[in-house]
Image: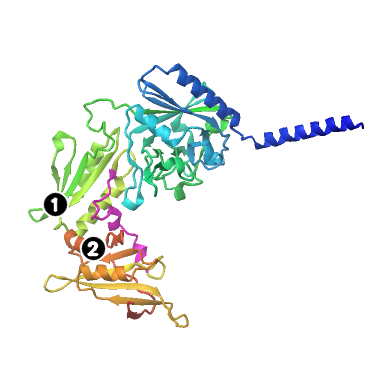
Amino acid sequence: MTRSFAIVYALAISTFASLAIAQDAKGPYDDAIAKIQQRSEALDRENANVAYVKVWPGVIADRRAQTVTIMGVATGIKRTDPLEFYMTPVESGKDYEALAVTPAKPSHIAAALMFINLKPGLPIDPEKNRFWARGSRLITHFTIAGKTKVDGNSVMVDTNTGKTIAGDLLFAGSYTFVDDKGVKHFAADEADARPLAPTYEDRAAVLAVPRRAMQSIVYGFQKPSDQTIRWTRGDSVDMVLSPIARGDPGNPFVLSDPMATPFTIALRVIRGDTHYIVTGPLSRDRGTEYPRVSLIVEFISISTHNLKTDIFTDVTIDDDVPVTKVRNLYAVLSTIEQDRGVKLNPPPADGLYYRAFLPDEAWRDRNTRLGEPWELFLKREVDAKLSARLERSVDNPDRGAAETKIVEKENPADPAAFAKHVNDHASRWSRTIFIYPPPDLTYGELMTWVRPVLATYPRVFVFPAEGPATQPTTQPATQPAN
């Protein structure tokens, strides 16, 4: 081999190696994403003078057609893969559990929906007892390779039931936060999952699911349908969003404002009896009194028939209503709370979330429950006043003792003393308060004890008085609280 040939040969090997490295470094969607960028630029030029059309990279909004189109690329997801995202930003790294990836930014999707005159709603926020996302309801469809149209209601399957899951989404709009330098950030652009359109509940989601779908519960049970596994990796996928038509203006449930609360249910004591006052948009039923919970069920069932939106509902309770009546109402509402139906709003800042009145009866057992909740026992004395006993079952600090648990006890004189004690002796294991009331406790009396601690103990549960107050620790020892 001559010296010149050796040099040429070495250069050739080096060139091929460089090409191979470059090929390896190239992302699997790079070519398709480049085409989307070119398509976006072309659409931007074509619509430069069209007032009702606006283009962002990977997104086009048409105010006249009332559509927002997100341009993406099929991931080639398999039938056995969990489906966590209808579409996800390409940089999220979540393509293995998404139908498609897109170069579009979540904040641009929100801007596009606002361009077609939709207002962002509210994402979930469990810390504020907001467990239902709110916002304009959107129907979805997908266009594959520019020709095949697939209904959004057919792309995901619940493997528990074998049925497809409705693909409606809500324009919740994610949330924003301000950093230490005063700079405002759009959460979905920066959250780890970049939750543009997740199939589970996410506080940062721009497009939120309208149903209850906790990630820890639905993960692994929501899978791609037979429709979607035919999508070839690299195929273009347009996800098209359209607001549901507001329809007949005579239908009081077709609301122009997705943040509206059309119903209020008030519990009031009238002439010595508890009445349920339902106020809503049906003119013939405004302020109707219902003395029985069963009639509330009938009323709401009729009202929600063929509903085109959700009935977000406030509940107000008079102080003199017995707690047993409050529990009865919430037991009924919890059975009919659902998507396309009644959805209860969070309580006021100084109120209890309705599930506070529907605790798991198994939590009474100190031997099996988790954590070390405070237990407040309220008792009606002869003079009609309430007395209180506070207990907490905790690990025995004496590791050599026969008993693994001891019961701390205190007798707070009033709500202020109760609040001071639980705050002074807070621990990471005692984040919850259980309340065992007398049968005749009123809502006002309950809240007199609860309100002082809600800021530090938002998890409060009120047990029915009919059951045993609690199941004691085996052979409990007692000692004063520290």
x and y percentages locating residue 54 in the rendered image = 40, 24
The residue indicated by pointer 1 is: 268
x and y percentages locating residue 204 in the rendered image = 41, 43
Q: Quadrant of the C terminus?
A: bottom left
Residue kind at label 1, given as amino acid type = Arg
* Magenta span includes 439: no
Total count of labels: 2
x and y percentages locating residue 471 in the rendered image = 34, 71
What range of the chain is rendered magenta? 343-365
Q: In this view, does 68 lie to the left or right of 280?
A: right
Q: Is residue 81 left or right of residue 277?
A: right
Residue positioned 11% across, 73% down in the render: 383
Q: Categorize mark 1 by other alpha carbons within 10 Å: few (<14), some (14-19), many (20+).
A: many
Residue positioned 42% across, 18% down in the render: 48
Residue furthest to the left in view is: 271
The residue indicated by pointer 2 is: 452
